[in-house]
Image: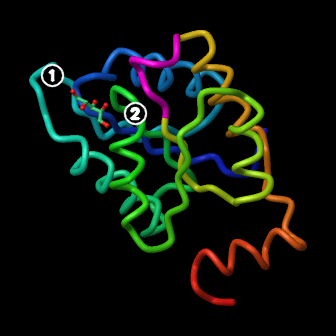
Amino acid sequence: MSASKRIVLSSDHAAIDLRQTIAKHIEAKGYTVTDIGPTTPESTHYPKHGAAAANTVAKGDADLGIILCGTGQGIMMAANKVPGIRCGVCTDTFSASMIRAHNNANMLSIGARVTGEGLALEIVDAFLGTDFEGGRHATRVDMIEGDA
Ligand code: RB5
């Protein structure tokens, strides 16, 4: 297991079931989960849920975040507006591992209308199970943050 153990989850209405499935899956693996909802199925606005999870990570109240909407795209865009957040949408396990290893992503986004439950759980496992490699990749991540 990665050293990053506190995970915040959020989604919009399109991904409540998959988000709750992911929460149970990672809790069973020993992660500490903060699921900030929503819990009711009314239509809602993905930017506020992406920003809420991103702010939780940016403040240091969670090590990593997992966010979901229909495509994973809109909520990812909202999360990446928060300084210090590096969030990628993943539809495959290789990318989920590489955004940790090379990009030091601190948030993962998944599209519940794109990715089925079984693959989504494997994507989550790949993301949480991979650590940042540092080295030359740290220079590049610093450039993303505007420090190089
Ligand atoms: C909601 O209908 C949908 O637009 C949203 O879940 C997401 O896919 C946006 O990127």
Give the image location of residue 93, x and y in percent: 72, 28
Report if residue 114 lies within the magenta region. Answer: yes
Q: In the rendered view of the protein, which quadrant contains the N terminus?
A: top right
Give the image location of residue 116, x and y in percent: 52, 11
**Residue stretch rendered in magenta on the structure:** 110-116
Report which quarter residue 45 is drawn in.
top left
Where is 17 relative to 29, above or below? above
Horizontally, residue 132 falls left or right of residue 22, namely: right
Mark 1 surroundings: few (<14), some (14-19) or many (≥20) residues within 10 A: few
- Residue sitting farthest toward the bottom: 148
Q: Which mark is residue 40?
A: 1
Q: In the rendered view of the protein, which quadrant contains the C terminus?
A: bottom right
Q: Which mark is residue 68?
A: 2
- Residue sitting farthest toward the right: 135
Q: Secondary structure at mark 2?
A: strand
* Count of number-bearing discs: 2
Horizontally, residue 39 falls left or right of residue 22, namely: left
Report if residue 120 lies within the magenta region. Answer: no
Say what amino acid the circle numbered 1 marks. Answer: Thr
Give the image location of residue 146, x and y in percent: 58, 85
